[in-house]
Image (cartoon, grey):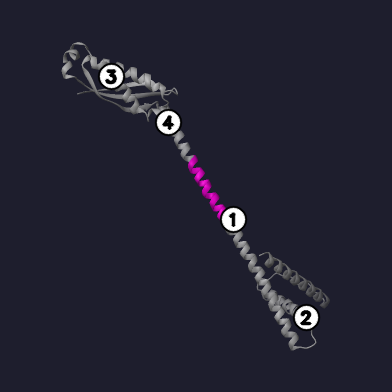
Amino acid sequence: MQQLDVSVETKTKDNVFVRVVVSVQYFVLPEKVYQAFYYLSNPEEQVTSFVFDTVRSTVPTIILDDVFEKKDDIADAVKKELSTVMGDFGYDILKALVTDIEPDEKVKDAMNEINAAQRLRVAATEKGEAEKILKVKQAEADAESKALSGKGIADQRMAIINGLKESVDDFQKSIPGTDASDVMNLVLITQYFDTLKDIGSGNNSNTILLPHSPGTIGELSDQIRQAIITGVETSKKTNQRG
């Protein structure tokens, strides 16, 4: 059994030069020893010539990316051609193998850059999708938080209104002759002075209080009362929508 390694330089269908190494395993047929000895003076040159011819007629029909996938087809074509020709000279071809495919160095570098760019593009796409999902989730969480906060404020205001209503009812029952307006004015003025007290008791307070008359306090109570009424109506509408 003999093995001959043949290196062939050729180009692909997309005009890329490659070096293809084909290993041919062959032996002399026992019944054709005479032909093998006298018909060919240099069988290795004959095998090499046919390998060159077959590779250079097969690879140019294939693009570079497919050459690596179709190396078995190239090897089969070489074996078929050699078996037909070398059989008449007393040789049989056991196997033909494409053992190496080496594109030009610049082409390899370009292929690696293309592959790296594709992987970077995929990574950037995946990263963008991940960031998109995070932003969507954050937006959903923010919207839900705001909705719950709004509901909490509405419930708080409703509780204040209900508490004031109970206080007014109890005050009217305890002191005959008073109406709801009197009670509300008293509650508002009390809260007003409590607020002033809290502001003045702060160690770091920089608030300046301007002098005002009792009439101003009356106007203030009217404004607060109107604000509460507006808050009640808003809470009712919110609950109805919910």
Disc 2 element: helix
Question: In the image, is 130 to the left or to the right of 150?
Answer: left
Q: Which mark is residue 224?
A: none
Q: Which residue is at the front of the view, 70 or 152?
A: 70
Give the Cα distance between marks 3 and 2. 115 Å
Q: Residue at x 76, y 81 (%)?
A: 183
Give the Cα distance between marks 1 and 4. 44 Å
**Residue position for label 4:** 109
Give the Cα distance between marks 3 and 4. 35 Å
Q: Are marks 1 and 4 in contact (CB under 8 Å)?
A: no
Task: Specify whether residue 10 is in view.
Answer: yes
Place of residue 170 in the rendered image (x, y in percent of width and height, measured from the top left)? 72, 85
Asked if 126 appears above or below 217 in the picture, the reply is above
Q: Residue at x 36, y 24 (%)?
A: 19
Determine crowd level at label 3: few under 14, some 14-19, many 20+ residues with C-alpha closer than 10 A. many
**Residue position for label 1:** 139
Q: Which residues are magenta?
A: 121-137
Disc 1 element: helix
Q: Amino acid at mark 3?
A: Leu
Q: Which mark is residue 82?
A: 3
